[in-house]
Amino acid sequence: MSPHAVGFREASARAVLDPALREAIRRVTDNLAVRRVQVTAELPHFDVLRDRAKRIKEHTLANLDRYLEQLEAAVQARGGHVHWARDAEEAAACVVRICREAGARRVAKSKSMVTEEVELNRALREAGIEPVETDLGEFVVQISGDRPSHLIAPIIHKRREDVAELFRRHLGTPADAPVPVLTAAARAHLRQAFLQAEVGITGANFLVAETGTVVVVENEGNARMVTSLPRVHVAVAGIEKVVPRLADLAVFLPLLVRSATGQRLSAYVSLLTGPRRPGERDGPDGFHLVLVDNGRSRMLADPELREALQCIRCSACLNVCPVYERAGGHAYGSVYSGPIGAVLTPALTGGRGLVDLPFASSLCGACRDVCPLRIDIPRMLVVLRARAGRTAAARWERRVARVAAWLLCRPRLYRWASLAARALEPVVRNVPVGPLRRWTRARELPRLSPTPFHRTVPR
């Protein structure tokens, strides 16, 4: 993950002043949230599936070393190759090496958050290899030089007019082209990428230890093209994506799809097990699985944050978060945004964003309520806030808290301070100074109660 150019406070302050961005995000997230409620209500045993999935993930993470070894053995038994990457640089270098060995000049990529995490496209370009994103949203992100702003809807922040202008410049479509014309132009362009690419790269929604199977869930069909037409398929996945058995997919797939897109089932669920076998017409000649750590082992060893590794990247928490709705995904400075991103980014990176991101939440608990794995995100945000409070950047907050505690322990002084605050309130509200200027730039100061609390309590 690239380092923060701008912190969350500054980036979100700019985002909340963009009404078009807020409206675009609200429209999509509200739609996804409503559809999720509708389709989950159809399953009377949905909560039973949630509980079962959580137990499976807890068991898997507690025995992750064993299941990773089983996964490696299963992949190798079926003719595949497994590579282990300790960090982002090692993961990207491994994929570049595989592409060079395959003689690749162009690779076709399916949507993958972990390849965004390790900045694989940049590494490929620096090696003289052209990566082509084949998911429509990721393709728009790529040609615009942008970054995804949502886990499953990467261009949630762009309008149709923005996409039309991009396609006019890059694909030669008319400036006023309707959506069918735009999608047809993208299809024609990407078809050449599928046909010319020597290597296809995907992520993985799940990795089945029992069979060595890579599970890819999508709606456009591009992942099937990426994994069948190029001679070599490379799957890049975090080590936490493992599930023990193929039968476990019957638990996770309904949870993932209904929580992510509000569908009963995605259009394409691909189960990929090794390269093409003798007598098979479809599939790659070679298969490589790159397992990425990049801070996950550190999270696994942290009992207070380990639960975040259960995340299946459904984005349900983003769609109900009032902070994400107003700030947008780019404000988080990471490929992982929203409530889960506020936990994952500091945890995976060993502290980057620790001062800002844990505070990018109202702690309303909506993210925990909709999470298909019942991940207690608010609890982990409180943990990270406590850790942020031990950093140098939070010293001034501790000083303010000590002054407040000293004042609250002295009732007479507190009452005089209360009178002073009431007298100064109109001045402070109309002419904010110092730190208050940053606060009032995007919100109103709370008004003091007509009757102070200490006057409502008998002495």
Image (cartoon, rainbow, N blue to C red):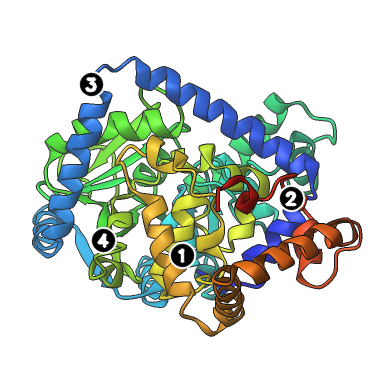
Disc on the earlier residue, 1 or 4: 4
Could one spot residue 103 in this view of the protein?
A: no
> Residue 84's x, y, as percent?
25, 71
How far, Cα to Cα, is label 4 from label 2? 51 Å
Disc on the earlier residue, 4 or 3: 3
Q: Identify the secondary structure beneath mark 3.
A: loop
* The label number, if any, that marks residue 345 in the structure image: 1
User: 354 or 177, which is in the foreground?
Assistant: 354
How far, Cα to Cα, is label 4 from label 3? 29 Å
> Residue 123's x, y, as percent?
50, 72
> 146 left or right of 370?
right
What residue would you read off at disc 4? 239
The crowding category of the residue bearing disc 4, from other C-alpha atoms within 10 Å (few below 14, some 14 to 19, many at least 20), is many
Which circle, 1 or 2, is nearer the viewer? 2
The crowding category of the residue bearing disc 1, from other C-alpha atoms within 10 Å (few below 14, some 14 to 19, many at least 20), is many
> Residue 107's x, y, as percent?
47, 57
What residue would you read off at disc 3? 45
Disc on the earlier residue, 1 or 3: 3
How far, Cα to Cα, is label 1 from label 4? 16 Å
User: 230 or 138, which is in the foreground?
Assistant: 138
**Quick check: 129 above or below 272?**
below
Are the two marked residues, 1 and 4, in contact with CB atoms closer than 8 angstroms? Answer: no
The crowding category of the residue bearing disc 2, from other C-alpha atoms within 10 Å (few below 14, some 14 to 19, many at least 20), is few
To which quarter of the image does residue 403 belong?
A: bottom right
Could one spot residue 158 in this view of the protein?
A: yes
Residue at 45% over, 47% down: 110
Q: Identify the secondary structure beneath mark 1.
A: helix
Q: Which amino acid type corresponds to the residue marked 2 in the rendered image?
A: Leu
